[in-house]
Image (cartoon, rainbow, N blue to C red):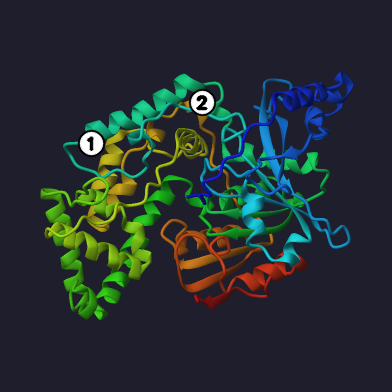
Amino acid sequence: MAARSGRTIPALTLGAATALLAALTPAPASAADDPLRPYTTQQPRWERCDTEQPATLECATIAAPLDYADPAGRRIDLTISRIRTDDTRRRHGVLLMNPGGPGSPGLSMPADMAQILPAQVRERYDLVGFDPRGVGRSSPLTCGLTEDERTVLHPYHDATFPKDVQRARTVADKCRAKAADVLPHLTTRNTARDMDLIRAVLGERKISYFGFSYGTYLGSVYTQLFPRRSDRIVLDSAVDPALAWRGTLLAWPARAELAFTRWSEWAAERDATHHLGATPAAVRRTFWDLIAHADRTPVPTTGAALDGDAIRAEYRAFVHPAAATDRITALKAAAAGGPPAPAAPDELPGDNEMSAAWAVFCGDTRTWPRDPEQYRRDARRERARHPLAGDLAAGIQPCAFWPTEAREDATTVDNTAGALIVQNEWDPQATLDLAHGMHRALHGSRMITVTGGEGHGVIVAGPSCADTPALHYLTTGNLPATDLTCPAA
């Protein structure tokens, strides 16, 4: 659930980090008055992040308490970044950003968003990014996960379910062995507390915020914990905070089936070109015949050959009917002996990203079932209800075996925050139903729905019809009077 820029930010120099730590030594009297004062009064030392990034993007590392209930205890690093506005007359404050995940690094996000946001926004804000705790340059977590252990979606089969259970248990065991003392503190609530620490260190009374995908949930938790410090909040491609996190996964297949139906209608109208079937029913038969063939004889691609489960795992592509039609046409031809189909893009997250993701997914809530048989029943039921992807999302996850002490009660988001939610109608990850859940949780929010909009991300994918009202909100603080809909380009 993340935006990926493919960019990395190097560590600060050892000399700069040492000097900063020396400057963080708290005065006992100050700590007694306010346990967080040694953190909130830090003076970050800024320097250029990376010679491959714009010179205007600067980074600093600050300290944060591992456990906010014990500020005098162990510290962790938080690395932050910024591009400052040079318009002191129009400057409104800071626009803090998160690119999603969980587990995605965010240091490059100010530079990425500076290319998207218009000058009217850039002149009003310092654009501020950060690597969330446990991620990237912020005391990164690593569990030593294999490629198979970094995959979220796995098909269900009776014969392979014991292997699935063992995989999930192994991930939890690896993370416990590597970081048992850290796992209880790698949660969304603590990342939201880090955001408020960043606000204080930057000397701001309030922060504005732009969050994408998982970042929308993080932003909603911040508004719940710090309502008086939340300014202008933009949530791009939102998830339902009431469903974090197993409910989020279970929500994907229902929307996937709707997208699959829409695709079959689109392809049927173009049968003269693509020859997948003259009716939606015929197109669906073509697809399921391809799945059955691939289960018998995997379909050759320029990468690995794909069995039926691997083809089903590409279900998110159906929100883009034209691209999905090209993909299925190529796989069908390859299955019939034609040239290999193109390999699917490799989107597998790295060990740090996925280790941090499991920590958040599993640690944010105690609602994950503990009984493996519950996952078996759920996978069978969801496969019957949603044949395309139901079992992929319902299968057993490491959260079934996550340490009890590393879980916390789910955060109830229920407030009057004045946020702007922007949403594509056809988003395979932050689905329209999930976005409506966020809208219900934030009673003061407004929502812009891009009808016919395809894919994960609105403003981050830009340009779109949502840009103008979002720009107006960020520059004036005025939300639309009502919810809006506008057509995709």
- Residue 81 image label: none
- Residue 405 image label: 2
Q: Residues within 10 Å of mark 1 (few under 14, many from 20)?
A: some
- Relative to 229, 276 lies left or right: left
Which of 101 and 15 lies nearest the eye of the viewer?
15
Rendered location of residue 282, percent (x, y): 16, 72
Name the residue that disc number 1 marks. Answer: 161
Dot 1 falls on a residue whose secondary structure is helix
Indicate which label's residue lies in the foreground, 1 or 2: 1
Query: Which residue is rendered at x = 82% and y = 48% of the image?
Result: 205
Which label's residue is closer to the chain start, 1 or 2?
A: 1
Q: Residues within 10 Å of mark 2 (few under 14, many from 20)?
A: few
- Above or below 200: residue 337: below
Which of 18 and 100 lies nearest the eye of the viewer?
18
- Relative to 445, 353 lies left or right: left
Rendered location of residue 141, percent (x, y): 53, 29
Q: Residue furthest front?
A: 51
Q: Amino acid at mark 1?
A: Phe
Q: Amino acid at mark 2?
A: Glu
